[in-house]
Image: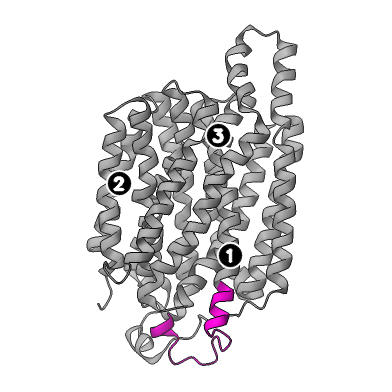
């Protein structure tokens, strides 16, 4: 990793001077923006498809399951894709795959078949798995290891600004005032009128997803034609190589495996905070036309956290200490959401964006520290951990049906406690620090 693992590899990335690094960050920033936009559309798709496809709360959270389980399924193939095509071309392949997934939304909307929506989401998630496997270690490697969290924070701002815009822009196409009225009117409709109304509602997702397809294909071409430098992560300098004597696979690094589970839990709670808040606001009696802005509030909270990270890491606070602080704040805000109600409770869920903000930037460099030539394999495992966004929110959805949407937030407390453990001791297990 840059000052350590790249120090004695002059052939690894000869083009990565100051201007090359800036250009690389600009391109990766654009990638973080687009997959942030695509990812956080799910927050509005959950309550929207719940109405359009007549789903239970548990069924509606298969939106996140289909999207994030792709990371678990595709991560091993992601490594092979990057080894075959390299980082840059692998990113283009990923963007084209995402466009193919978005294309499925057209027949899904025309037939109102929930399974087709889920298949489209799975394919989009598969493309993102490749994109994440390439882009996260890339942005970690292009500069000093001790400031990796700062660079990832900058990428996170791109991601979360897109996340803040996504539900608002999608909401303009979905006519949510009609959705609110339709929810209450369905019971009094005849079967023919009910089917016609739901079909018309489902068709509204087609225009925005056509736009998404176009943007993804344009971005794929831009990345393919760009001068983005290739980085060789299969070599390591003498210091890392000597410490990795006897290491035969990534599974010989306990701190990586614990990092994968930590990332699994973190992505789970982040997705709950971002994707459940609109539905939760509705359950608290808030109209969908107002609730559509709640995910944006969560994203803004995350952006504030990222900005603080950029200013303070590593000058004033170490990456692991930032992770420790965020985990504690996560527990406190979760309890605040559980023991209050209405807009106050929703505000605590939105503030979880702040608690979650520095977790991703801190977990990646901590988990990748000292792995040298196993970086791609470790990154692949970490990307598999993103499947927490499939499993943990689904558990939340099941608990919401059994208890209620508010009490289901108890699932987040043990998740944040384990993240705190990783920040204090877990990232040191099996490492010479």
Q: Is residue 71 left or right of residue 182?
A: left
Specify whether 291 is left or right of 337.
Answer: right
Mark 1 crowd level (few <14, some 14–19, many ≥20, 10 Å Cα) = many
- Quarter in which the C terminus is drawn: bottom left
Q: Name the residue located 57 percent from the left edge and 14 percent from the top edge.
A: 184
Q: Residue furthest left?
A: 424
Residue 20 magenta: yes
The Cα atoms of the two marked residues, 1 and 3, are separated by: 27 Å
Badge 2 element: helix
Which of the numbered marks, if any, corresponds to residue 46?
3
Q: Quadrant of residue 419?
A: bottom left
Q: Position of residue 368 (x, y in %)?
A: 40, 71
Q: Residues within 10 Å of mark 3 (few under 14, many from 20)?
A: many
In the image, residue 190 above or below residue 413: above
Can residue 417 be seen in the rendering of this structure? Answer: no
Element type at mark 3: helix
In this figure, which residue is indicated by the disc labeled 1? 78
- Residue 197 place in picture, x, y as percent: 71, 19
Which circle's residue, 2 or 3, is located before the other in the chain?
Answer: 3
Badge 2: how crowded within 10 Å, few (<14), some, or many (20+)?
A: many
Placement of the N terminus among the 4 image quadrants: bottom left
Circle 1 or circle 2, nearest the eye: 2
Point 46% across, 80% down: residue: 373
Report the span colored magenta.
1-24
Q: Label 2, on which residue?
A: 330
Q: Position of residue 267 (x, y in %)?
A: 43, 50
12 lies left or right of 205: left
Q: Position of residue 325 (x, y in %)?
A: 25, 55
Q: Earlier in the sequence, mark 1 or mark 2?
A: 1
Report how many numbered discs are placed on residues in the image: 3
Please say if 196 is above or below 416: above
């Amino acid at each position: 990793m840059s000052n350590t693992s790249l120090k004695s590899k002059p052939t690894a990335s000869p083009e990565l001077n100051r201007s090359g690094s800036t250009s690389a960050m600009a391109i990766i920033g654009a990638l973080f923006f687009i997959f942030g936009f695509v990812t956080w559309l799910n927050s509005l798709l959950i309550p929207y498809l719940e109405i359009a496809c007549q789903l239970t709360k548990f069924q509606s959270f298969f939106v996140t399951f289909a999207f994030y389980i792709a990371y678990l399924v595709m991560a091993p193939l992601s490594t092979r894709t990057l080894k075959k095509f390299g980082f840059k071309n692998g990113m283009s392949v990923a963007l084209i795959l995402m466009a193919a997934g978005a294309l499925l939304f057209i027949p899904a909307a025309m037939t109102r078949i929930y399974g087709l929506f889920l298949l489209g989401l799975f394919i989009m998630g598969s493309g993102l798995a490749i994109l994440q496997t390439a882009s996260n270690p890339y942005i970690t490697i292009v500069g000093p290891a001790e400031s990796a969290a700062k660079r990832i924070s900058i990428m996170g701002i791109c991601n979360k600004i897109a996340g803040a815009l996504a539900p608002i822009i999608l909401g303009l196409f979905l006519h949510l005032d009609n959705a609110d009225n339709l929810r209450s009117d369905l019971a009094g409709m005849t079967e023919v009128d009910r089917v016609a109304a739901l079909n018309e509602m489902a068709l509204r997702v087609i225009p925005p997803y056509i736009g998404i397809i176009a943007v993804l294909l344009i971005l794929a071409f831009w990345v393919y034609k760009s001068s983005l430098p290739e980085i060789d992560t299969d070599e390591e300098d003498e210091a890392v190589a000597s410490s990795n004597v006897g290491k035969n696979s990534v599974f010989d690094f306990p701190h990586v495996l614990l990092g994968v589970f930590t990332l699994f839990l973190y992505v789970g709670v982040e997705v709950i905070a971002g994707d459940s808040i609109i539905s939760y606001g509705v359950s608290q009696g808030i109209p969908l036309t107002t609730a559509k802005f709640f995910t944006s509030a969560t994203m803004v909270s995350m952006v504030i956290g990222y900005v603080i990270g950029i200013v303070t890491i590593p000058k004033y606070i170490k990456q692991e200490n930032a992770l420790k602080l965020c985990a504690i704040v996560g527990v406190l805000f979760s309890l605040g959401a559980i023991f209050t109600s209405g807009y106050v409770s929703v505000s605590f869920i939105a503030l979880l964006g702040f608690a979650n903000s520095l977790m991703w930037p801190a977990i990646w460099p901590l988990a990748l520290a000292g792995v040298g030539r196993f970086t791609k394999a470790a990154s692949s495992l970490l990307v598999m951990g993103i499947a927490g966004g499939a499993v943990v929110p689904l558990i939340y959805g099941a608990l919401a049906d059994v208890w209620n949407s508010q009490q289901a937030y108890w699932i987040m407390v043990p998740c944040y406690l384990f993240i705190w453990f990783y920040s204090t001791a877990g990232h040191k297990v099996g490492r010479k620090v």
